[in-house]
Image: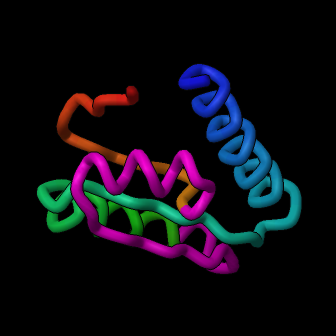
Amino acid sequence: AEVRAAFVGLDRLRATAAAVREFGSGTLRVAAYPALGLSFVPKAVRQFREEWPEVRLTFHVAGSTAIRDLVASGHMDVGLAADEIETT
């Protein structure tokens, strides 16, 4: 089940990336651990928006467990977590 959920998440990410490449638009939903959300991610978002201005970007800061749940449920496309996430 865990591996299947990971592949479903990867498939969603691939579909989003393909839409961005093909149409230059779409929505990308990103969740990040607070330490990354306050430093690394804002810089990456700025660069992403310069290259892909038509893509709607949603950004959410959360803890690792919440990030896992958001990505697994399909509410977020990408999750950046600092801790190892328990999946059982």
Is the image coloured rainbow, by chain, by secondary structure, or in one colour? rainbow
Name the residue: 23% across, 63% down: 37
Image spot of residue 12 (x, y percent): 71, 47
Is residue 67 highlighted in magenta?
A: yes
Q: Quadrant of the C terminus?
A: top left
Q: Nearer the viewer, residue 63 or 52?
A: 63
Q: Which residues are magenta?
A: 50-75
Image spot of residue 60 (x, y percent): 37, 71
Q: Residue furthest left?
A: 35
Q: Nearer the viewer, residue 52 or 31?
A: 31
Vertical arrangement, residue 26 with respect to residue 44, above or below: below
Q: Nearer the viewer, residue 65 or 55?
A: 65
Name the residue: 39% across, 60% down: 31
In the rendered structure, the answer to whether residue 53 lies left or right of residue 78 reads right
Q: Residue furthest front?
A: 88
Image spot of residue 26 (x, y percent): 74, 70
Is residue 65 highlighted in magenta?
A: yes
Vertical arrangement, residue 55 with respect to residue 82, above or below: below
Q: Quadrant of the N terminus?
A: top right
- How many numbered circles does the render carry? 0
